[in-house]
Image: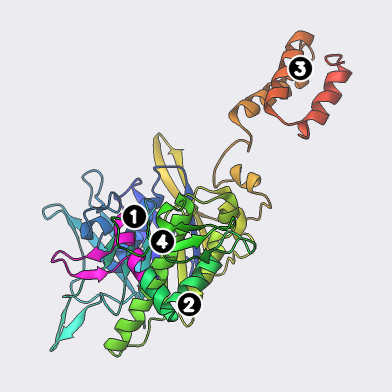
Amino acid sequence: MIEQLALRNVGPAPSMDLEFGRRLNLLTGDNGLGKSFLLDIAWWSLTRKWPAELNRRLPMGLPAKPHGDEPASITFSVTGQSKSVTYQSKFDRKDQAWKGAAGRPVNPGLVLYAQADGSFAAWDPARNYWRKKGNVDVQDRPPAYVFSTQEIWDGLRDSEGRVLCNGLISDWASWQKERGEAFKRLEAVLSSLSPSAMERIQLGNLTRISLDDARDIPTIRMPYGQDVPVLHASAGLRRILALAYLLVWTWEEHLKAAALIDMKPTHQVTFLVDEIECHLHPKWQRRIVAALLEVVKSLAAKASVQVIAATHSPLVMASVEPIFDAKEDAWFDLDFETIGKRQSVVVRQRQFVVHGEAGNWLTSEAFDLRSSRSIEAEEALERAALAMARKDFSKSDAQAIHLELQKVIGDTDPFWLRWRFVGEKKGWLP
């Protein structure tokens, strides 16, 4: 698990400092301010490799580079299997690499990273950590398992063509035929990640989708009764199916690897998720954070679970209100601010306040909108408010505003009561 990050002259700001909660951490902020960057840094701090460094097919997760000519550093604290350790890595401009203390790093437990583009990375202490050869610590295992979006479905191979993962299509079909523990876990995970209790994701029968494709393709039984091949599912459903499969696959492989090397299963899981609401309908957005916490905890029942998620969704923020615990959770907000004569990105840990409705989150510090209405409605209401405050406003101009308001706000909008009361009193409206 990751405890702290302190960045100097790397990323969008001269300095960024974060102290993470033990369980749930939320990152908000406008596009381009560094949410994905912070998740990349967190992954690197825990695993010491950049996702795109391990899989060239990824368009995201590239190595971080310093800005300007000043010395750059990444300082981070990681909780290992038995202790907490703080490291500092400095950027070596000659070698174009981040360098720190040599030797075996602390073991952070299982680390997962779901990126915004659908790619996925997993670091497993049983399969990716250093091992001893004689009295020497060596890292001769795969540094991590990093999937492009397509490789999640079709399988992952190393540079020599060896199969590292069969992929969702093959594994799912195999698990379904065997009806073993992996299939039961997949069913349970998909049920937990369903959009609602009334719309549980149900697995259908295996099928073929083409004369030229000999694979047995898993299906999802839709509410209207049809079994739809997973390859034909919607973007939102495919996102959930991929997450469910990867969580089950990672945990299944960890258990098998731990048994092979006579190691106890990990007692720590860190899950990084970028744009956690990606492709999801609002009813799904209201459930996804709590559901993912529940799923990871159910798989790794004896492990501590830390989730760090970036979001643009007010519904996600509202959905967290019942479960947010200030003792073990944290919310970080990135803003673009003018400090002195300079404009800079600033990250702040904000106090989590219950707003009650998703619309109220839009006007909070998380999203910084002036209102939760359309731009046109916001501008029309501002003109109407100015008109009501003036004593010399003409009747014709007021009636023009009235017609504009009718186009952009609903009949039940609370503003109508105030507008009609003032309009009738001033003789603008009949």
Checking the image for residue 184, the label placed there is: 2
Depth-wise, is mark 2 or mark 4 nearer the camera? 2
Is disc 2 surrounded by few (<14), some (14 to 19) or many (20+) residues within 10 Å? Answer: few
User: Is residue 48 visible in the rendered structure shown here?
Assistant: yes
* Residue type at tag 1: Ser
Rendered location of residue 199, percent (x, y): 61, 60
Rendered location of residue 98, percent (x, y): 20, 59
Residue at label 4?
242
Rendered location of residue 401, percent (x, y): 72, 17
Q: Earlier in the sequence, mark 1 or mark 4?
A: 1
Residue at label 1?
210
How many angstroms separate mark 2 from mark 1 (CA)? Answer: 28 Å
How many angstroms separate mark 2 from mark 4 (CA)? Answer: 16 Å
The magenta region covers 148-172
Q: Cβ–Cβ below 8 Å for labels 3 and 1? A: no
Rendered location of residue 34, percent (x, y): 38, 48
* Residue type at tag 2: Lys
The verdict on residue 149 being magenta is yes
Q: Earlier in the sequence, mark 3 or mark 2?
A: 2
How many angstroms separate mark 3 from mark 1 (CA)? Answer: 70 Å
How many angstroms separate mark 3 from mark 2 (CA)? Answer: 68 Å
Q: Earlier in the sequence, mark 2 or mark 4?
A: 2
Residue at label 3?
390
Say which element carries label 4.
helix
* Residue type at tag 4: Ala
Residue drawn at point x = 42 percent, y = 66 percent = 206
Say which element carries label 2.
helix
